[in-house]
Amino acid sequence: MSARLVQIYLPEDQIERLETILPHHTRRFWRETLPGEQEKYTCIVQQRYTERLLADLEDAFSAVPSFTAHVAQLEAVLPAMEESPATELPLASELAPPTWLERFFSRDRLSTDELYDDIQDSLQLRPSFVLTVTLSAIIAGLGMRSGQVAVVIGAMIIAPLLGPTMGLALAATVGDWKLGKQAGITLALGSALAVLVGLVIGAIVTIDPLTPELRNRTIVQPADIALALACGAAGVLAFSRGASLALVGVMVAVALVPPLTAAGIYTGAGLPAAGASAMFLFTVNLVCVNVAGIATFLFQGLPPKSWRITTGIMLVWIGILALLAAMMAGRILLGFGAWESVFGFLEIHR
């Protein structure tokens, strides 16, 4: 059973109000008097109640200057805190009780504040981010050039595009424009750097454009949409439960890093049409990851600040995906793709 240790610091005159809130979220809490007319409450909270406790605390005490709440993860609690309908704590009277699906999918999800804390560092444009993007693109590019799948997987593991990708989906879900802007800038710069590295590789290294690992990044099919949707959903599920960032990075990077690098390689090798097809695959994957990511966050009960904003953003992403799917269908039906340009290039240079 996952639990959190929540410590709350408040002035003495706010205690009565706090003690009307805590019984809705925990049965175990202790009071400690501190110097300066401050009171400290220590609570053991089941993970599924952390989200709503923090929301109630913010609503009630955000205007109190000395209010502070700390959240820490607990490895074990004795006696154990059972999770069952019989032990479920009551909601406020004006809120509808959660459905069994909401209970099932949200009970082991990190709270919104914990998700923010996990993702903030990965959105910073630090030298380590630039170096890791560069190295992952080099590894991916050379791995695809030589057809070594294991090397490409290694590039996915170290690729740092997880943070900004998850940041976009999280920002859209909760309606946080500041987080979305920061994630978008970081993702755009990281993507541009991966393409630039690919351009250099394509310009200075001899490549075989028909190598399967490269060629597959220029072919967009319905299965690619399914793959990207699965990557986005799996990435959010793992991320929202505190899984290893490297593990989640594989799920997301599999849909983003290789086509970016392939686009640069083909363009640098003088095959811009093939490069455009690889960039088209990246665009499809990015949109799919965000659509699946937002849907999965909502499915887990992540509370939007405004359903109107979140719904509008989701509809925009779905509209873009529908347009891209129509373009993909048109390319398939018309038999048009990057490989006419590739084969033409090969014929000219025979």
Image (cartoon, helix red, strand yellow):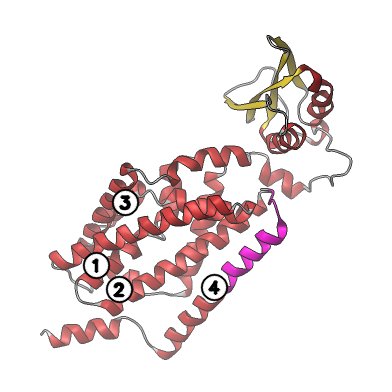
Numbered circle sitting on residue 265 = 1
Q: Give the residue type at disc 2.
A: Gly
**93 and 76: which is toward the camera:** 93
Badge 1 vs badge 2, beta-carbon distance below 8 Å: yes
Q: Which residue is mark 2?
A: 275
Quarter of the figure with the N terminus: top right
Q: Does the rendering let one see residue 109?
A: no
Q: Which residue is mark 4?
A: 320
Q: Does the rendering let one see residue 76?
A: yes
Q: Give the residue type at disc 1.
A: Ile
Give the Cα separation between the discs numbered 1 and 2. 7 Å
Q: Secondary structure at mark 1?
A: helix
Q: Secondary structure at mark 2?
A: helix
Give the Cα separation between the discs numbered 4 and 2. 21 Å
Q: Give the residue type at disc 4.
A: Ile
- Tell me which residue sits at (31%, 48%) in the image: 130
Mark closer to the chain start, 3 or 2: 3
Badge 1 vs badge 3, beta-carbon distance below 8 Å: no
Residue 42 x, y percent position in the rendering:
69, 19
Give the Cα separation between the discs numbered 1 and 4. 26 Å
Q: Crowding near pointer 1: few (<14 within 10 Å), some, many (20+)? A: many
Residue 49 x, y percent position in the rendering:
72, 35
Residue 120 x, y percent position in the rendering:
49, 42
Q: Secondary structure at mark 3?
A: helix
Give the Cα separation between the discs numbered 1 and 3. 15 Å
Q: Which residues are magenta?
A: 303-320
Mark closer to the chain start, 1 or 3: 3
